[in-house]
Image (cartoon, helix red, strand yellow):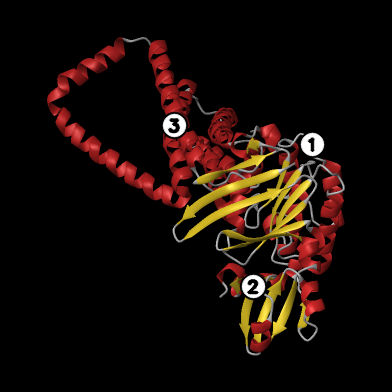
Amino acid sequence: MKLELNQVVKKYDGFQLDCTLTVEEGCVTGLIGRNGAGKSTAFKAALGLIRMNAGTITLDGKDITKLSPKEKENVGVVLSDSGFNGILTIKDIIVIMKNTYRKFQKEAFENHCKQFSLPLNKPVKEFSTGMKAKLKVLLAMSYEAKLLILDEPTAGLDVVARDEILDMLREYMENEENSILISSHISSDLEGLCDDVYMIDNGKIVLHEETNVLLDAYGVLKVTKEQYEKLDKSYIVSRKKESYGYSLLTSEKQYYVENYPDITVEKSGIDQIITLLISGTREGDMV
Amino acid sequence: MKGLLIKDLRILMRQKNLLLYMVICGFFLCANGLDFTLGFLVMIGSMLGLNTVAYDMMDNGMAYLMTLPAGRKSYALEKYAVVFLFGFMTTAAAVVLRVGASLILRQPLEFGVFLSTCVGMFAAVSLLVAVMIPVNLKFGPEKGRIVLILMFAVVAGFSAVAAQAAEGLETGIVRLIEVLEQTSAVVLAGGGVLVWIVLMGISLLCTMHIMEKKEF
């Protein structure tokens, strides 16, 4: 399924979301940004939980506010701060899901719960943070949804459980019709999973790039002031002042490796890219 | 909507201790012949249904519920269904308890009086619920209680003023009572049901409108 947020605007006091984003069919799209950047607002808009001031959101070309219950069954959801009431047990939730989603896979869901050691008879409120996170993801994947919208699905999980969940998401993506929109604070999750990544800051999308391009072509140059003056800045995306001079984010790491052999060029991870894009001066603003 | 209804029933079942206390208290109230107090159980049943709104709102749970394939209008409708379902269930339980107590303890039972007490209580409670569902969904359970108290204060104040103003209209009121006394019970009951349906319909429309506009 293809999800499109087209020039979506949502205004709050002191904050405005202004977002255009596409999740292509068969792709995993990541949304990254620091706390309060607008990720959850964008997710809520995509799910029709808030009313927009402008823009359109479509799922396979259909306005999300006009989706029928049957069409809504194609969307699996994890919200970081919301779920079924904790007084309920997994056994209760299974009955609810069976009567809510026509394609709910009871046996597969129960097997996954056993695999992740989730007790069926214990109230969810007594679960650890990690157990709650696992349950949310398992629920979203339990009824053959074609699009998963996952807001911080791996938050609170230990490394092993995180890998297990990510493996499940990869398995889910083996069906080429499926798509995922995911946000996470853990950049390694996104690096290993996403086909493309949107970076959001202060409500605006500041970068959209394919993940392999981000990881292969982007890099960080560490230069002195003198080196900076002589540098060709055509491929510099962002600049941050440092004690030794500048850290520069480039979208063409190889160009600088070949043409400036005396400059230190480091491979950049998503964390570094976020840091440099957000706390540095961006290309358009540089003098 | 079926899924939402089952969710609320499951939440109710998780409060089985409370239900058990209600049954025990109900039995002892029956034993003492306190029919009116037993009718109070009907109110508690409806309130338990209404309380599911608070359970839904707990820990921001509404946001997730709104992503289920039920829709906002279905959610509103389901809340009325669950409140009345719980109300009917407790009414039925109250009847069973009263009849059971009268048989076991060999007490005389004026069934008609008892049943009309339960129906009257149910009608009164449903009107209260008709106000509380939209108020709770609009303001949340905590603020909702404050809004409700304020509303009762306004209604009480208005009633006091209206009562003073109506002193000169005593003849009219007496005449109205006379007319009502002459009207057949069937017509009165039918009229009552009609008024009840209209009020519930207005309440439901208000709730649907609130849900459509609400953000999560």
Label pair 3/2, CB-CB below 8 angstroms: no
Q: Which residue is mark 1?
A: A103
Of the two numbered discs 2 and 1 on the same chain, state the one appearing first in sequence: 1
Which numbered disc covers residue A238?
A: 2
Percent coordinates x, y for residue B157 in the rendering: 24, 41
In the picture, the quarter occupied by the N terminus of chain A is top right
- Which of A199/B134 is in front? A199
Asked which secondary structure carries label 1, the reply is loop
* Circle 2/circle 1 CB separation < 8 Å: no
Q: Position of residue B158 (x, y in %)?
A: 24, 37
Q: Say if residue A198 shows up in the picture.
A: yes
Residue B203's disc is: 3
Taking depth in this image into account, of B44 and A271 the one nearest to the observer is A271
Q: Secondary structure at mark 3?
A: helix
Q: Can marks 3 and 2 be said to lie on one chain?
A: no
| Residue in the picture at 65% in, 57% down | A80
